[in-house]
Amino acid sequence: MSGIKATGEKNLMVFSGRSYPELAREVADCLGIELTPTKLHDFANGEIYARYLESVRGCDAFVIQSHTAPINKWIMEQLIMVDALKRASATRITVVMPFFGYARQDKKGRGREPITARLMADLFRTAGADRLMSVDLHTSQIQGFFDGPVDHLFALSILADYLEDKLAMDRVTVVAPDAGRVRVAERWTDKLGTPMAIIHKRRDPDVANEVKVHEVVGEVRGRTCVLIDDMIDTGGTICKAADALFEQGASKVVVAATHAVLSGPAVDRLKNSRISEVVVTNTLPIPEEARFDKLTVLSIAPLIARAISEVFSDGSVTSLFEGDS
């Protein structure tokens, strides 16, 4: 049986969609259980079918699905899996999305725009989810979009511990690539005991609002700069930020990010940049063709497994990060 009994009543069961079963299996291995057998397939017109191959009645269910490309398909599949669990009388359903799709659309920047991150939360609530779990949300306010508990996990310790073992901390400056990442950079400096710098982007008044000037606020000359972000998508922001740091005399730039989206030109940009190393976690699958010598991938599975264990035992997920805040 894939479920394990913690008491005479509670039964932990972990389910995986098809977007990234390798991570789900790794999480299950960390928990010492097996994934629940699930039948998932596409009909000829693209509709998705889901059915669990053993009883889920009364279970504490955790549905793992990373929102990778094709992102809309995998979100829909996870919604269908949640609906199937609800209709099969699972006691509690936790949606585990290591990468929260549409998280960047968390507010209206202009009129007539959607707030798609809120729509995502509403969809999962309507499908039957009791709880959400995700890693390094693009903004913390997304936690308030879901009418129920949201476990916001942080990859800081995983990334920072790795870099702490590799770098001379007395020569390190943590750098926020823009104003939106300042709070995250502060957590890094608290963890590592290093100074912080910020890259301020403004439009060049002499170039008709087309080119942005990157101003570095903080001491980076002769130092190793750890450039942090929640995700790397096309790599444009990170590479331009690294160039600005080198222009201000940085001796070395290392990038640390949780989510390796790596869309379009990202791999070529990072490979051809002066960045020494790009450290990410495996919240998203990284195919072989997207891997390169500078890329280091750390596993997020033990952290997700610990969080699942805390939720299942009615423990404290917050306690996992008390030293990081």
Image: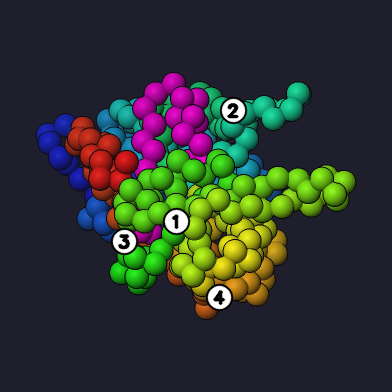
- Mark 1 or 3, closer to the camera: 1
Identify the residue under disc 2.
119
Q: Secondary structure at mark 4?
A: loop
Is residue 158 among the parts visible in the rendering? no
Q: Nearer the viewer, residue 306 or 60?
A: 306
Give yes or no for contact between labels 4 and 3 (Cβ–Cβ under 8 Å). no
Where is residue 144? Give x, y as percent: 46, 25
User: Residue 151 sits in which quadrant?
Assistant: top left
Distance of label 4 from label 2 (alpha carbons):
36 Å
User: Observer-nearest residue: 119 or 77?
Assistant: 119
Q: CA distance from mark 3 to mark 2?
A: 35 Å
Query: Which is more foreground, mark 4 or mark 2?
Result: 4
Q: Which range of residues does the magenta coloring cover? A: 135-162
User: Which callout, 1 or 2, points to the residue nearer the camera?
Assistant: 1
Name the residue carrying label 1. Answer: 174
Mark 1 residue type: Val
Classify mark 3: helix, strand or loop. helix
Report the residue at 63% width, 61% height from top. 244
